[in-house]
């Protein structure tokens, strides 16, 4: 539901103050004094478009989600302050799911009751739980984490990320062609271990598929999806002879420390979920253990320049100057601004197509399905069959000497959707 708010300009008073001196100058004994006509008050009406944010504000993921929420609010404020969507005022209403799947549907209904026009959720499983309701109610939801169940078959849910299997195909192809001389050395041995989750298991399955499709490039060693825990002895022994190893995400620090302590030398390869734990890497001083680790990433890193990363850094320092360095140190959380940027640009396209008063869920859906944008030479797009925005990814390397990530390949890698 769209609300209307009015901003009243006090133009009548200003006009009157300007006209009075002129009236006095034009009057004489034999002249008729002009009487100013009453000036009508000018009203400027802004259409309020409300973004519902289904997040975690007090649960186990609240620290990470809080930084994402911060980026959402900051970019919305930036768009409002600079009138980047003329005739529109953007607002954010947030619901605390406490990271409990049982609260996702109540949260969705709570946001609906407050008249949100669309929903954004950084919570990984939320799109899977809510997809059927969004399709039935025709409410557009933008999710931050990719999964097939949450976004296919195509409907009213859209994702600002890359499917894990597509990332795996693209990543392994780059490694085979640029980091491993398989023609000279033969196929590289590769494996993985991590906590059970749809994202991790999809990535692991795609790694196996790629190895099967390209036996000249990779030999699959083993893959382990385990319950939550921090003891990795059996998995480490099974993966000791790997040339490349995709380690656990949240348990990266523990796994890397134990793997290196056992004397094993596989090169670690990770992605944005691993980069979310840069603060823990620093706290544990594991730079040497992870030196040379590769990262497949969806946006530019903090030490780069570019249109979107420059905007991200600018609004971060403008709104959180005292804590900006600490936020950067935590990793990728605030970089979710890049996903929010796509959402706001889609809203802008919808408003340009139908006008502020004509904005509704159908207009947003139509704008999303036809959305296409290039930022810093990386493309983002949706279609009637495509629900993952990214058309490319970047390759980065962790360097212990500098204690940071650095762009390893200056070119964006086009997303590969088949092994």
Image (cartoon, rainbow, N blue to C red):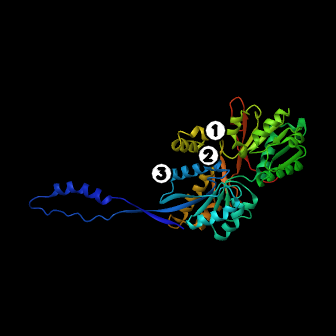
Taking the image as shown, residue 59 lies to the left or right of residue 114, namely: right
Circle 1 is placed at which residue position?
A: 329
Q: Is residue 301 visible?
A: no
| 312, above or below 10, in the image | above
- For marks 3 and 2 on the same chain, the one whose residue lies earlier in the sequence: 3
Q: Is residue 309 above or below residue 56?
A: above
Q: Mark 1, mark 3: which one is toward the viewer? A: 1
Along the line of sight, the residue nearer the viewer: 289 or 375: 289
Give how far apart the Cα atoms at labels 1 and 2 are.
10 Å
**Which residue is found at the position 62% from the left and 66% from the top?**
109
- Labels 1 and 2: the sequence-earlier one: 1
Q: Nearer the viewer, residue 244 or 193?
A: 193
Q: Residue at x 64, y 54 (%)?
A: 56
Q: Is residue 134 visible?
A: yes
User: Which residue, given by chain and number where applicable, does mark 3 sit on?
Assistant: 81
Which is closer to the viewer, label 3 or label 2?
A: 2
Alpha carbon distance from label 1 to label 3:
28 Å
Residue 373: horizontal and vertical position, in percent? Answer: 62, 53
Q: Residue furthest bottom?
A: 136
Q: Which mark is residue 334?
A: 2
Q: 43 left or right of 18? A: right
Structural crowding at the residue carrying mark 3, measured as other residues with C-alpha within 10 Å and reported as few (<14), some (14–19) or many (≥20): few
User: Label 3 vs label 2: CA separation?
Assistant: 20 Å
Q: Residue at x 80, y 41 (%)?
A: 175
Secondary structure state at the residue bearing disc 1: helix
Residue at 16 percent of width and 56 percent of height: 24
Picture coordinates of residue 29, whole percent (x, y): 8, 60
In the picture, the quarter occupied by the N terminus is: bottom right
Considering every residue shown, the one lying at the far top of the view is 401
Q: Is residue 233 left or right of residue 286?
A: right
Element assignment for label 3: helix
Residue 294 - label: none
């Amino acid at each position: 539901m769209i609300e209307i708010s009015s901003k009243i300009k006090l133009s009548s008073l200003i006009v009157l103050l300007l006209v009075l001196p002129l009236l006095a100058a034009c009057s004489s004994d034999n002249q008729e004094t002009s009487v100013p006509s009453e000036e009508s008050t000018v009203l400027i009406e802004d259409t309020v478009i409300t973004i519902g944010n289904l997040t975690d504000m007090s649960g186990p993921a609240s620290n990470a989600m809080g930084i994402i929420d911060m980026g959402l609010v900051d970019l919305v404020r930036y768009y409002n302050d600079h009138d980047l969507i003329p005739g529109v005022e953007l607002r954010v209403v947030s619901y605390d799911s406490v990271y409990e799947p049982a609260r996702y549907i109540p949260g969705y209904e709570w946001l609906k009751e407050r008249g949100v026009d669309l929903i954004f959720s950084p919570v990984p499983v939320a799109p899977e739980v809510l997809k059927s309701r969004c399709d039935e109610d025709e409410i557009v939801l933008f999710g931050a984490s990719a999964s097939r169940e949450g976004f296919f078959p195509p409907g009213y849910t859209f994702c600002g990320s890359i499917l894990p299997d597509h990332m795996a195909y693209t990543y392994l192809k780059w490694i085979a062609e640029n980091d491993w001389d398989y023609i000279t050395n033969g196929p590289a041995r590769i494996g993985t271990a991590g906590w059970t989750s749809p994202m991790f298991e999809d990535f692991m399955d795609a790694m196996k598929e790629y190895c099967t499709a390209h036996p000249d490039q990779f030999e699959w060693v083993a893959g382990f999806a385990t319950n939550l825990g921090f003891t990795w002895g059996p998995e480490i022994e099974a993966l000791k002879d790997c040339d490349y190893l995709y380690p656990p995400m949240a348990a990266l620090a523990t796994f890397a420390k134990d793997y290196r302590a056992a004397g094993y030398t596989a090169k670690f390869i990770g992605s944005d979920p691993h980069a979310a734990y840069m603060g823990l890497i620093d706290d544990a001083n594991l730079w040497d253990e992870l030196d040379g680790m590769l990262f497949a990433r969806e946006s530019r890193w903090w030490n780069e320049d570019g249109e979107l990363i420059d905007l991200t850094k600018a609004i971060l320092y403008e709104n959180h100057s005292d804590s900006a360095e600490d936020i950067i140190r935590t990793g990728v959380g605030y970089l979710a601004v890049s996903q929010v940027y796509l959402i706001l640009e889609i809203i802008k396209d919808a408003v340009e197509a139908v006008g502020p008063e004509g904005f509704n869920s159908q207009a947003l859906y139509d704008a999303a399905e036809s959305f296409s944008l290039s930022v810093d030479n990386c493309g983002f797009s949706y279609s009637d069959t495509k629900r993952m925005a990214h058309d490319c990814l970047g390759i980065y390397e962790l360097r212990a000497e500098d204690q940071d990530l650095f762009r390893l390949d200056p070119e964006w890698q086009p997303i590969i959707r088949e092994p």
